[in-house]
Image (cartoon, rainbow, N blue to C red):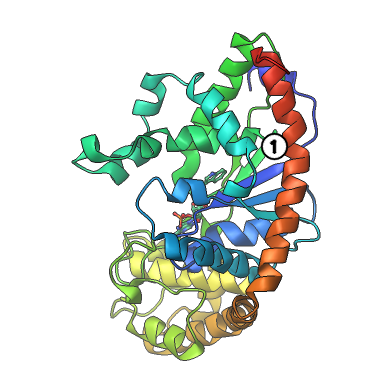
Amino acid sequence: MSDDSKSYDGPERVFSGMQPSGDLHLGNYLGALINWVRLQDEHECVYCIVDMHAITVPQDPKKLASQTREIASAWLAAGIDPERAMVYAQSSVPAHAQLAWIFNCVARMGWVERMTQFKDKAGKDSERASVGLFTYPVLQAADILAFKGTHVPVGEDQKQHLELSRDIAEKFNRDFDAPGFFPQPEPLIQGPGARIMSLKDGTKKMSKSDPSDLSRINLIDDADTIAKKIKKAKSDSDALPSETEGLEGRPEAANLVGIYAVLAGQTTAQVLSEFGGDGFGRFKPALAELAVEKLSPITSAMRDYMADPAQVDRILEQGAARARDISEPILAEVRRIVGFWGS
Ligand code: AMP
Ligand code: TRP
């Protein structure tokens, strides 16, 4: 940690976000949401549905608000408690956009040009990508720092964006002679679920952008669909090993055993001590049964929330009001530090 981060002595606060695009899947649940739920017991948590990030690529305006409600429903169903954690849509709290502009003037072109996610998302035709897609990670830094977020639970893939957030925080504090004003947010990349792989290819991440729906388990899938997807999941013809080392070089077997372990709250070794020597003909039905047992309460709660959009809207509005209460005074200080008129 740099000297600057040492001089931040404000409270700890957890901040994270997810885009309102596509269905949530088992990777989002085991890689991110399970940690978010756990963190709300110990910390003040701010969980933001980042609809402003979503429009960096084209979105259907008729669907964006309902996708936002759908993500909120999934979070609530997974156990995020709106009485404790704040749950709201990014576009309903002005501090995100206000701070993002200031950070656009702090971040250097060279820093943002190094971000690999832009290169992946823009593809070959980067000339035609939106300017917003380029400055996406700057908005992400503003999300976190508008709340002086200190801890950010995310999957592996967000590490580079968090490094940029720290660089921006440090440069702001230095350029404006405000030591310790912004904290240096730390990523929390935790647990055996940090990287859940595709059910069709154990070397690829489970992802909402995979064209094959059989590659992932969606939180909205019903019990039959979950069982069918596990039955059809790619595996191999060997029996499961009794020791963890025996999974090396068997990515599909490792992924299925890993999913079982996280869902059951066991270690890989414990799973193998029970199933070592069994073929997939016996292991897959056991995994399907466990997945249905753990996911179906979430699926049914999610359907209940989605059937009551007015309730979800009330929760999002309350979350936004609390988020404005925290971020507005921080932004007022930022305006003063920058020297804006009237501040
Ligand atoms: P995304 O679905 O890419 O918008 O990601 C939302 C959150 O879920 C981020 O914190 C990701 O790091 C996490 N995540 C997405 N896919 C996976 C996966 N296959 N395994 C573990 N975590 C994931
Ligand atoms: N970029 C993140 C993702 O794709 C989403 C996100 C936006 C985010 N703002 C954030 C995550 C702030 C953590 C903190 O998953």
Whole-percent x and y of residue 196?
45, 62
Q: Residues within 10 Å of mark 1 (few under 14, many from 20)?
A: many
Q: Which residue is located at x 55 percent, y 70 percent?
A: 261
Q: Nearer the viewer, residue 253 or 218?
A: 218
Please give the residue where the numbered disc 1 appears in the rendered image.
147
Residue positioned 50% across, 88% down in the render: 223
Q: Residue furthest left?
A: 124
Query: Which corner quadrant of the image does residue 171 belong to?
Result: top right
Q: Amino acid at mark 1?
A: Phe
Q: Position of residue 57 (x, y in %)?
A: 36, 49
Point 36% across, 80% down: residue: 239
Question: Closer to the camera, 10 or 192?
Answer: 10
Picture coordinates of residue 94, whole percent (x, y): 63, 39
Pick whichever, 240 or 229, lies toward us.
Answer: 229
**Residue 3 in view here:** no
Kindly indicate the quadrant of the structure image that contains residue 191.
bottom right
